[in-house]
Amino acid sequence: MAGRRVLVTGVSGYLGSEIARSLAADPEIEHVVGLDERPPRERLRDVEFIEADIRGGELGELLPRAGVDTVIHNKIVRRPGPRLSPRAAHEINVIGTLELLAACERAAGVAAIVIRGSAGIYGAEPDAPQFFPEELARLYPLRTRFQRDVGEIENLFDAFARRNREVVCTMLRYQPAIGPSLDTQITQYLSPPLVPTPLGFDPRIQLVHEYDAVGATLAAVRRPVRGAVNVAGPGTIGLSRLVRRAGRSALPVPAVLFDTATATARRLGGPRVSPDLRRLLRYGRAVDTTRLTEEVGFRPRFSTPDAVEDWVRAKGGRRLVSAVGELLPGR
Amino acid sequence: MNDAPRTPGESATGPLLRPAVVFLRALRAGLARGVSPLEALASAGAALPGEARGAIEAAISRLEGDYAEDEWGFDEGFADAVFPLLELMYERWWRVRAIGVGNVPAHGRALLVANHAGVLPWDATMIATAIMREHPLPRPTRFLVLRWAFELPWLSIAVRRLGGVVASPYNAVRLLEEEELVAVFPEGARGIGKRWSERYRLQRFGRGGFVEIALRTGAPIVPVAVVGSEEIYPKIADARLLARLIGAPYFPITPTFPALGPLGAIPLPSRWRIEFGEPIETAGYGPDSAEDRRLVLELAERVRSDIQNRLLTGVFERGSAFI
């Protein structure tokens, strides 16, 4: 295992940087190459940075030259941002993965590929199993654009794995991440003082702490397994409890008006709520993490409720209700 | 059997309702002593501040999200808080008589199989209440609920917090592997959508999926016959178009619903009788026998006829449905 050479795509994002940093500090890893369209905010020590667009055709030349044996594909866009159209996000996700896998096929010596994918492929459904095992990925039709992207990425990866049996292909299906350093759709959703929630619904939400999000990818590099592996903090948290723990107040909105309400809030400067998040807020989703703990050998440090607590602690939000509570006599 | 005394303020009364109960009890005691209503009210109120503070503190920790849910979404605080309501339904509204509660294993996995009737899953809550109240070692029951309950606002919240999960073999197997007590209703939507004229006639038990689950996990099957649930919402017709519109498997028309609006959701006060049969052991067959179609169908039929027989004798023994 010693002397491994690893490529990390999407190295400029927070999780990509952390993964590259940890790998560079690992004595078993000889060399780390980071790839992204823009350089990371601060220079990563002992990481060779290549500035390239994953969608461009350059990968075919760059990858053999880097001479890596392990590829971590971390460049998957989970939500279109202000400077990223849904179309561009789709291209990065699908065309980017296609280009990367094509380059891996041509470059000799790639022995393992880990993709940081999404548990979004399971969807959020009222009659879903309470904990999705890996084999139930296609139980429901892929309803949203992002889900179809993830579905296509998994198809490409499966086809690649069938053609290249000597390469160990690991698809990590991540639940949404939360943590003090992260700026994700979930943390943005919980940022305004009044958080819109679907009236009459209080689904179970499952998250993964940023610390474990990095750790799970590293564990999969250390012990590669074939096929899909769910990544999540064990346990779940009810949406209303999540909102309350975040020190926010829920603003229940009837389900039929929910789209309009979130779109209006968005226009007033509120956070964007993607169709995936909308379904998640109504029906919730949790996954089975047996494979992660038993086969990859990774035990998350934070359960979902603990991850939320840690995020709340770091955020140090104002707690209106406790302020009222302190006024009570004899407490 | 039903009037097992409960001392005031016992843990079964939820923390949020306890002050009201204490308050009303003090009020009643005062009135019984023969003092004027105003005096009784004042002395009852004197007991309130300490209790009220407890209630407010409980409410605050609730509002801060400082309460526990398990990974299935079962919320013990919520279940405790509504338990008095369920107890009231159990004791006064339906006057439930529970028979053979001791047949429910006190620990470890077990599968309760019951007949299903009444539009809302009241029968599941009453089975759970019977075990909480009458079993020598009370334990919570997880019940499998049809998917559409999770598509309806509020109902989805209540069902989840009370320990309901979506009826799916994955959920049932996982719960049993966690040594839980699980209640299933193999009649499913066919059961709750029955007409008045079909009451107490068990519908087909699907393809015996519940037997497969029991065999795979080695959980004993406890047949449960619920008498009384058929009369709570006497369905006289079904508005199919409306049902399709709201995505429910049927849209019941009863003497009170939808004519009385939401009031029509109040179940009729029929008299109930819940009988728990002797457990049928399945561990001896081994997990591989879940593939054995003949064994599965045989066991399913055995459970079905057991429940059907108990239903017929149960209806007879109960006597009049309402009084």
Image (tube, rainbow, N blue to C red):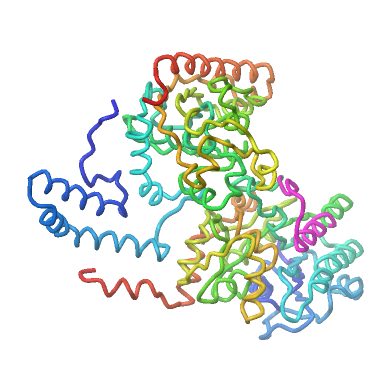
> Is A264 located above or below residue B201 in the figure?
below
Give the residue displayed 28% in from the left and 25% down from the top. Answer: B1
Which span of residues is magenta-colored?
A136-156
Q: Is residue A154 magenta?
A: yes
Is residue A224 or residue B79 the one in the foreground? B79
Q: Position of residue B157 (x, y in %)?
A: 51, 51
Tell which of A296 and A137 is nearer to you: A137
> Quarter-wise, where is residue B140 in the image?
top left
- In the image, what residue occupies the spot 37% across and 22% down? B99
Q: Residue furthest bottom?
A: A42
Query: Which percent across, then down, holds residue B256?
Result: 50, 38
**Which image quarter: residue A275?**
bottom right
Residue B322 on image: x %, y %: 40, 26
Q: Is residue B87 above or below residue A1?
A: above
Residue visible at 63% across and 59% down in the picture: A280
Left or right of B24? Residue A152 is: right
Residue B297 higher or lower than B81, as above or below = above
Q: Count of labels shown?
A: 0
Q: What is the quadrant of residue A185 in the picture?
A: bottom right
- Position of the N terminus of chain A, as image quadrant, is bottom right
| Prevailing secondary structure of the magenta residues | helix
Q: Is residue A72 magenta?
A: no
Viewer-closest of A283 and A139: A283
Task: Pick the quarter of the image with the C terminus of chain A.
Answer: bottom left
Horizontal side of residue B100 vs A16, given as left or right: left
Give the farthest residue toward the front. Answer: B259
Residue A194: give x, y in percent of width and height: 52, 73
Q: Nearer the viewer, residue B235 or A105?
A: B235
Left or right for A217, reference A309 = right
Q: Is residue B213 above or below residue B46?
A: above
